[in-house]
Structure formats: structure tokens, C-alpha cells
Image: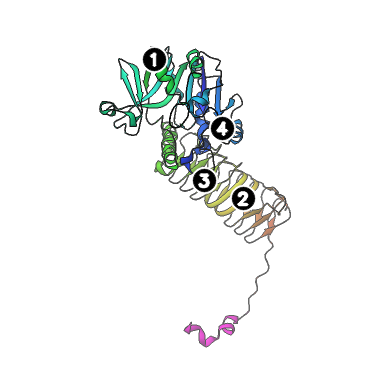
């Protein structure tokens, strides 16, 4: 889908309305920073992408470099050339068309952005709104933009216009470079505005083409409220895509799925489920209020209220309520309830009783517990790693295992039970028992 197109993404602003120490473009939606989505969609269209930075530029650049290796970064000369026009100054795109995006629009899609690429010297995105109150108006005549007017400057007829500027532009690169130097900051904010290029094109009798775009896709995020609303839209897109491919979801509005998650087959997600990071679910049933993070589940069921922490891999396994697994490789295992299984490998046919804990951390290092096939682990067992329990072992309830057993063993280390006759009556007094 890539075209002869350069893309500039504006990500220099602080975002004061976010009321946060985090740069606006680094606030996350569905597991990734907003700027990530702008770059991801841009890469579908262009091999020449420049991100403009200023506020906490090093942090923003280092964050994006975790995901992308072929992006250029440009630091805006904010002291001398503030504003959206100033942000573009000093960049020399390599292609004949240049698309200018905003890094705080995480819902944009390449399939719609490509519509802005035309033969015109300047194409701009516009919204056709039921009520354009609060927006600058775009005056369109005979399919061409004739004027952009800020709401405070609108006359009565212009206030009735419902076409608004959506804030994304595609320039003929030659026109852009020839006119950027002509921008001035003769305004109350003393900033250089990219919108002034529209007026300059009109004065040069060049056609400015308006392209109507989706209000939902071109939503800008300027506050925590905007962030939450955008994430709802983004989550709905993710879940609708999975349901269209056969995933069953109960009360999908309560389910949270990050963008990097993969789901295959006719999996079932119940209410309150959270799937995080690079999780992959294959033909599995995730029951209510369970969390899976950076793990793989195949032909398994977990929960309700189970937690599968990073680097776990469950195959043909049943995990019940209040079971937590971390770095666990379980194949054909049953762990019904109330257990912690960390840094472990458990093989087929083994049963993990309630209250079982792998004691994998000694305060300095973490150790592995390896459990073979057909091992029965009784309730309230502590497995003190490192341990290697072979096939066909039975561990009695209440046992603390510190040494490797042999195949076929019963492991038992309970303190022998002791009963002191009549102690209850001696302690409380026989005559006081019924009065308590």
C-alpha cells in the first residue's frame, strides 16, 4: 500500500490539558502509546517518516525506538519557531507529496489517510458535523476550499457552516518547501501556523481540495477524558475484529484486550477478562475476571479469577479459581484452586492440590521446580525449589518437599498428630462450656 509519500508526525507538544508529567503522545491506549499508532499507520503508506519532537524529546524518541528502527526524528526550534508551522520547518521530505499528521490521533487508519493523497497542491481533511460549535469553519465552494475561519471570527452565515477543519494535510512537497519560509507569527500567540499555508495557496489561485473524514477516526486526545473515550472506541474495534473471526465474548464491554494480543479458534472470553501484552489464546476458555499477560494458552481453560503472569505456556490444562502461574510451562495439568506455581514445568496427568506453592525465591535468586507425569500433589504442599520430581510420585497433603524423590515414592513429612485427652475441658472449665 506504500506510495510516493513522505509523512511528518507532529509530536512536540506538552499537552497541558492532560495534567500529567508524561508527554501527551506517550499516554497509552490498549497497551501502546498514542504516538505508536500514528507511526504504525504511517508505515503502511510511507518509507520516509519524520517525527517532530520538543517536550521531553529524549524520552519520546527512546520510547518509540523500542518499536521502530526506520524513523527519523526532528527537534523543533520551539524558541524561535513555535507552532504547527514552525514544527515542519527544517524538514526536507524526499517524496513529491508530504502528509502532515498529529501524534495525538490514535484512531486514524491508513486506509482513510490515503484518500488525502491527490494531484492538488494541498489537500486538507474536513469534518461534516451536525454541530460545529467550537471548531474553525471551512468555507467550501464548488468542491474547493475558499476560506478557513476561526469560530471567534465567523460572521452569522459562517457560523451556520457545519464543515470543520480536521487538522491533517497533504501538501505538494515543492509547494510546502517554497512557502514555509513565508509564514509569519503576526498573531496573538506569536506562533507559526500550518493553517496559514491554506490561505497562501488560495491567494496563489491554487486548488485546495477538502476530503471529508470520519469524526471518530480523527478524534484528537487532549485530556484524560478524551483518552478514556478514545480507548473505548479502540477496544470496540479490537473486540469486534476477534468476534468476527469466531471468538465468543460474554459482556464484551467489560473485557479488556491489548493491541498485541492474538486469539485463534473458537475461544471463549467471559466478563471481566483482561488479555495483556503478547498473549496468544488458542481454542481456550478464559473465565470471568481472569488476567493473562504475555503468555500462551492452547486448548486450556482458566478461572474464574485466575492470573497467568508473563512467560507462561499452558497446553491442554485446567486452571481454576485463585490460581496464579508465573513462568510456568504446564501440559495436561489440573490445578483446581488456590495455588501459586512460579518458575515451574509440570507434565501431563499431574494434579496440583489446593494451597500448593512453589517456593521459588530465596531472597536472592529464583529456582526451578520440575514436576513429571502423573504426579499427585496434595493440598497445602510447599515445593522448595530447586526440585526435580519425577513421574509417578504422590505427595501427601501438608508436606514441605525439599529433596528430590524417586519415581513411585510417597513423599510425607508431617509432624505426627498428637491428642491430649480432655484438654478442652481443662482449659475452659467443663462447667463453663455451655455458658460461652
Q: Secondary structure at mark 1?
A: helix
Residue 170 in percent (x, y) is at 45, 19
**Which mark's residue is nearer the viewer, 4 or 1?**
1
Q: Which residue is mark 2?
A: 341
Report which quarter residue 115 is drawn in.
top left
Tell me, yes or no, if residue 108 can be seen here.
Answer: yes
Q: Residue at x 62, y 53 (%)?
A: 376
Q: Is residue 349 above or below residue 31?
A: below
Q: Which residue is mark 1?
A: 203
Tell me, yes or no, if residue 115 can be seen here.
Answer: no
**Which mark's residue is nearer the viewer, 2 or 3?**
3
Q: Are marks 2 and 4 in contact (CB under 8 Å)?
A: no
Q: Choose the circle earlier in sequence order: 2 or 1.
A: 1
Report which quarter residue 251 is drawn in.
top left
Q: Residue at x 52, y 50 (%)?
A: 320
Image disc number at residue 54: 4
Residue 254 in percent (x, y) is at 42, 44
Q: Is residue 94 above or below residue 256?
A: above
336 lies left or right of 239 = right
Q: Residue at x 58, y 54 (%)?
A: 339
- In 3D space, how far apart are the residues under numbered discs 2 and 3 (Cα atoms)? 15 Å
Q: Choose the circle earlier in sequence order: 1 or 3.
A: 1
Q: Residue furthest bottom?
A: 431
Residue 35 in percent (x, y) is at 52, 32
Q: Is residue 348 above or below residue 32?
A: below
Q: Choose the circle earlier in sequence order: 4 or 1.
A: 4
**Which mark's residue is nearer the viewer, 2 or 1?**
1
Write the start and end of the magenta stretch as one range.
419-436
Image disc number at residue 325: none
- In 3D space, how far apart are the residues under numbered discs 4 and 1 (Cα atoms)? 32 Å
Q: Choose the circle earlier in sequence order: 2 or 3.
A: 3
Q: Choose the circle earlier in sequence order: 4 or 3.
A: 4
Amino acid at each position: 500500500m506504500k506510495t510516493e509519500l513522505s509523512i511528518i508526525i507532529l509530536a512536540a507538544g506538552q499537552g497541558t490539558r492532560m495534567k500529567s508529567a508524561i508527554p501527551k503522545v506517550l499516554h497509552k491506549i490498549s497497551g501502546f502509546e498514542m504516538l505508536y499508532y500514528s507511526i504504525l499507520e504511517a508505515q503502511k503508506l510511507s518509507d520516509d517518516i519524520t517525527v517532530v519532537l520538543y517536550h521531553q524529546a529524549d524520552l519520546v524518541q527512546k520510547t518509540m525506538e523500542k518499536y521502530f528502527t526506520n524513523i527519523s526524528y526532528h527537534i523543533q526550534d520551539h524558541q524561535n519557531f513555535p507552532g504547527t508551522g514552525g514544527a515542519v520547518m527544517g524538514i526536507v521530505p524526499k517524496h513529491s507529496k508530504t502528509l502532515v499528521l498529529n501524534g495525538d490521533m490514535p484512531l486514524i487508519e491508513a486506509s482513510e489517510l490515503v484518500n488525502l493523497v491527490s494531484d492538488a497542491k494541498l489537500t486538507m481533511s474536513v469534518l461534516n458535523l451536525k454541530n460545529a460549535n467550537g471548531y474553525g469553519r471551512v468555507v467550501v465552494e464548488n468542491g474547493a476550499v475558499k476560506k478557513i475561519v476561526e469560530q471567534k471570527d465567523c460572521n452569522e452565515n459562517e457560523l451556520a457552516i457545519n464543515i470543520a477543519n480536521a487538522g491533517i494535510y497533504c501538501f505538494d512537497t515543492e509547494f510546502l518547501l517554497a512557502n514555509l519560509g513565508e509564514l509569519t507569527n503576526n498573531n496573538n500567540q506569536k506562533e507559526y501556523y500550518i493553517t496559514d499555508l491554506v490561505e497562501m495557496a488560495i491567494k496563489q489561485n491554487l486548488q485546495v481540495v477538502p476530503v471529508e473524514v470520519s469524526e471518530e477516526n480523527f478524534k484528537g486526545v487532549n485530556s484524560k477524558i478524551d483518552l478514556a473515550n478514545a480507548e473505548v472506541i479502540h477496544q470496540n474495534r479490537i473486540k469486534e475484529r476477534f468476534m468476527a473471526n469466531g471468538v465468543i465474548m460474554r459482556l464484551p464491554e467489560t473485557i479488556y484486550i491489548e493491541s498485541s494480543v492474538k486469539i485463534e479458534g473458537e475461544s471463549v472470553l467471559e466478563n471481566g477478562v483482561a488479555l495483556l501484552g503478547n498473549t496468544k489464546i488458542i481454542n481456550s476458555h478464559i473465565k470471568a475476571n481472569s488476567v493473562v499477560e504475555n503468555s500462551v494458552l492452547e486448548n486450556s481453560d482458566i478461572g474464574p479469577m485466575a492470573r497467568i503472569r508473563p512467560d507462561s505456556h499452558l497446553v491442554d490444562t485446567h486452571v481454576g479459581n485463585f490460581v496464579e502461574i508465573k513462568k510456568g510451562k504446564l501440559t495436561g495439568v489440573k490445578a483446581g484452586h488456590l495455588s501459586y506455581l512460579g518458575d515451574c514445568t509440570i507434565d501431563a496427568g499431574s494434579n496440583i492440590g489446593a494451597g500448593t506453592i512453589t517456593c521459588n525465591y530465596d531472597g536472592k535468586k529464583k529456582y526451578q521446580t520440575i514436576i513429571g507425569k502423573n504426579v499427585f500433589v496434595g493440598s497445602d504442599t510447599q515445593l522448595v525449589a530447586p526440585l526435580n520430581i519425577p513421574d509417578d510420585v504422590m505427595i501427601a497433603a501438608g508436606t514441605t518437599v525439599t529433596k528430590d524423590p524417586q519415581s513411585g515414592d510417597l513423599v510425607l513429612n508431617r509432624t505426627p498428630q498428637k491428642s491430649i485427652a480432655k484438654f478442652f475441658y481443662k482449659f475452659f472449665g467443663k462447667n463453663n462450656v455451655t455458658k460461652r
